[in-house]
Image: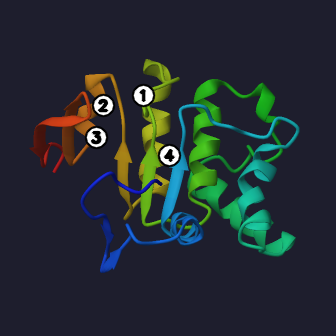
């Protein structure tokens, strides 16, 4: 999102450190999906409207197509009957699942999830990770977590302290 203090950041064969702010924004909207620790759902909109909003506002997709794509995402996630739900009535873990679906609207290559274990108790853990498995297959997922029980879901774990990598474990789940 920002330019680094030093070094280079590459996405494929493109150096991103020399891009303008507008070029970085375009790159983010095409290649990245974000799920923040707070779901940032629009309170006066339904679940389907929250998911469809990027289709309509960012990608200028016609309303009918946005509705169809949103329905497919909800179906894939195993939430076909959630579309009309009022987001203010959802549990925190359900809001995270809606935010996850909204982050996948642009079919990103990379999914960045902040505090993946936030708002998940033991009874909601399986549902969230099943949704993630269903809708994010084939994408690179980078997530932060504080609870070590989530480690079994990862192919690679980087432990960090004070901004520095202190441990790197690959193929944990593989």
* Residue 99, horizontal then vertical, whole percent: 62, 44
Identified at 45% across, 53% down, the residue is 2
**Which label lies toward us, 4 or 1?**
1
Q: Which of the numbered marks, if any, corresponds to residue 150?
A: 2
Looking at the picture, does residue 160 appear above or below residue 50?
above
Looking at the picture, does residue 21 appear above or below residue 165?
below
Mark pair 2, 1: CA separation:
7 Å
Q: Earlier in the sequence, mark 4 or mark 1?
A: 1
Cβ atoms under marks 3 and 1 closer than 8 Å: no
Q: Earlier in the sequence, mark 3 or mark 4?
A: 4
How many residues crowd mark 2 within 10 Å: few (<14), some (14–19), many (20+)? some
Cβ atoms under marks 3 and 2 closer than 8 Å: yes
**Which label lies toward us, 4 or 2?**
2
Cβ atoms under marks 4 and 1 closer than 8 Å: no
Mark pair 3, 4: CA separation:
13 Å
Read off the residue under disc 4: 131
Cβ atoms under marks 2 and 1 closer than 8 Å: yes
How many residues crowd mark 4 within 10 Å: few (<14), some (14–19), many (20+)? some
Mark pair 4, 1: CA separation:
14 Å
């Amino acid at each position: 999102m920002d330019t680094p203090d030093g070094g280079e950041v590459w996405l494929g064969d493109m150096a991103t450190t020399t891009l303008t702010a507008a070029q970085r924004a375009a790159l983010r909207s095409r290649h990245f999906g974000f799920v923040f620790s707070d779901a940032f759902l629009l309170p006066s909109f339904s679940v389907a409207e929250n998911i469809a909003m990027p289709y309509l506002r960012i990608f200028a997709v016609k309303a009918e197509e946005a509705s169809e794509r949103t329905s497919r995402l909800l179906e894939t996630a195993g939430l076909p009957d959630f579309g009309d739900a009022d987001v203010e009535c959802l549990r925190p873990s359900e809001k995270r699942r809606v935010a996850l679906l909204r982050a996948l609207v642009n079919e990103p290559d990379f999914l960045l999830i902040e505090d993946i274990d936030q708002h998940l108790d033991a009874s909601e853990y399986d549902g969230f990770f099943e949704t993630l498995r269903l809708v994010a297959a084939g994408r690179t997922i980078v997530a932060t977590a504080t609870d070590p029980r989530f480690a079994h879901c990862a192919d690679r774990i980087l432990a960090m302290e004070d901004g520095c990598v202190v441990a790197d474990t690959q193929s944990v789940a593989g």
